[in-house]
Image (spheres, rainbow, N blue to C red):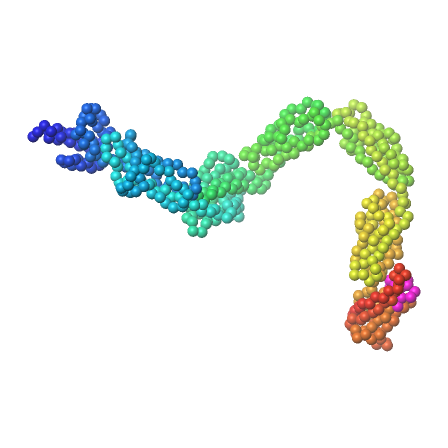
Amino acid sequence: MGKFTTLLIFVCFFINASLYAFNISNRVEFERGVIYNLDSAVNPFENSFTYDTVKNEYTKFLFSRIATAPPSVTSQIYLCQNSTAVPLTATPSVVGATLKWYTELTGGVALLGAPTPITTTVGSTTYYVTEIPLLGVESTPRTPIIVNVVADNGTINKVLKCDPSQILPADINSSVFFDWGNVTGNPNSYNVSYTIQGGPVFTGSTGLSHWQVFGMLPGQSATLTLTHATLPCIPAQTVTCYVPCGVSTVTPTFPSIPTSYCINEATTNLPTSSENSPAITGTWSATKVNTATAGTTNYVFTPNPILFPCALTKILSVTVGPVEPNFSDFSICSGEAVPNLNSKSPNGISGIWSPSTIDNTTSGAYLFTPNPGQPCAPTVKTIYVTVIPSGAIVNLGWTVTYAFAENQIVTVTDPVGVNYLYQLDYGLFQQSPVFENVSLGTHSITVKDLNGCSEYSNDNIVVINYPKYFTPNNDGSNDTWNIFSLEDQSNFRILIFDRYGKFLKELRPESLGWDGTYNGHPMPSNDYWFSVEYAEQNIPKIFKSHFSLKR
């Protein structure tokens, strides 16, 4: 046997024994025999051969015949339409191996580098990748990477909402319920992530169209973000739900904080804990009461929303002096008994008046000077007392809509203005001098000023109209028909006819009215017509209409 053959057999034996020890399973075909259970083209030999051995042409030939494992890839890949894509990636199975990229499973020319998917068109595209070690053959077959360009599939649901109606009574104060609707034709597979009061993020998945969060406290909130698991381009939706506070609602109290200060008085920081038990912590809109400026300021305490979600905000009104006595202007009627000027204001400031008594004949100003030594140095106060003449209204003018109008309107024409109130008969006083839909007959109008210092009435406001029906049944009520509001006119005349135009009765001022008879015989229930001759503003007029007789 020649030297070449002996060397070759030795090398084959050595390689087979070494690779078997590493539990390698690739099959390697050699030109003069078959070597089994090989898994690597390079690493097992890095410590077994010298640089000169690797340079040997026979050794290179041997390594070139060992199979190469494929690179690791991720497939399938989903990209949204028109999104920005990045070059594809793969991980070689052998350190230092070179990746080669293709667009065909077999044949074709390798691309210059990793391809970047095009996302302008919806659909799927398959790319392929192989690797070539430093000393070895290209991996085969080519490894596919499927890239799916997906359109925006719409929304997960019409309304992602909180639905407490689906919570069992036992859980209503300790859980929230998120509900959504499935999109017809889409897989029902969702990913959820949520936080409670902004805490750690919890994740999960579901094939249902709802998600309930348990273990919460009254007033706490949970914010859930919902995404579709298999359709990545459906926009995510987020909603926040709250556990009801119910009887757990509480208002922070601060009874020991003063609500009044003198100007430039020293103050301390407002407490960040309430005086409730247990105390409620939070923050103030300003950490300290400002006494540099006189006036009233509202300070707002906002409870910590995470620790005390059921605590309400608290508004504390703080007044800074000097304080002004809170007397107000007023008015009196001339000649009436005058009230005493109080020596202490409603807000507790004592002092003296100048003048000391009120003049009930003339309007004037009155000065209140606080007594010295009072807290916060109260300021002086001037009020004005208005004396309104009594009995100033001495006349009342009015107009009435034309007789027999559909809407009878009485309008006061004198006096008028914002300082007067008006009354029809015994109704309520009103600011408007106009009364609509006034019934027929005689009425009373009263006018008074706002202060009640002057009042005037007229009881002779006549509205001319006719009764729409009468009932001649001798019950003492509404037994005759007449236009009584014309009784003061000496020359009015009313003619009554039946529905066929037959003359039945003539009424004069002295008449008591028609009793519903003709020639002593009762007329039947029906509509009857009339014609009335009267004068309005000394102008002769005639009015015609009809009324009903009811038995």
Query: Does the magenta run of residues contain 376?
Result: no
In this rendering, does residue 513 appear at all? no
How many numbered circles are shown? 0
Residue that appears at 84% across and 43% down: 451
Residue that appears at 77% across and 27% down: 378
Classify the position of the N terminus by image quarter: top left
Query: Does the magenta run of residues contain 492?
Result: yes
- Position of 498 compared to 10: left or right? right
Residue that appears at 31% across and 39% down: 102
Range of magenta residues = 484-493
Seen from the viewer's position, the closer of residues 98 and 245 is: 98
Residue that appears at 62% across and 27% down: 287
Which residue is at the far left? 1
Give coordinates of residue 139: x percent, y percent: 26, 37
Classify the position of the C terminus by image quarter: bottom right
In this rendering, does residue 436 appear at all? yes
Seen from the viewer's position, the closer of residues 215 and 20 is: 20
Seen from the viewer's position, the closer of residues 455 and 281 is: 455
Tell me the quarter of the picture where residue 375 sits: top right
Give coordinates of residue 46: x percent, y percent: 23, 26
The chief SS type of the magenta part is loop
Give coordinates of residue 454: x percent, y percent: 88, 45
On screen, residue 504 above or below 153: below
Give coordinates of residue 244: x percent, y percent: 56, 42
- Position of 285 compared to 110: left or right? right
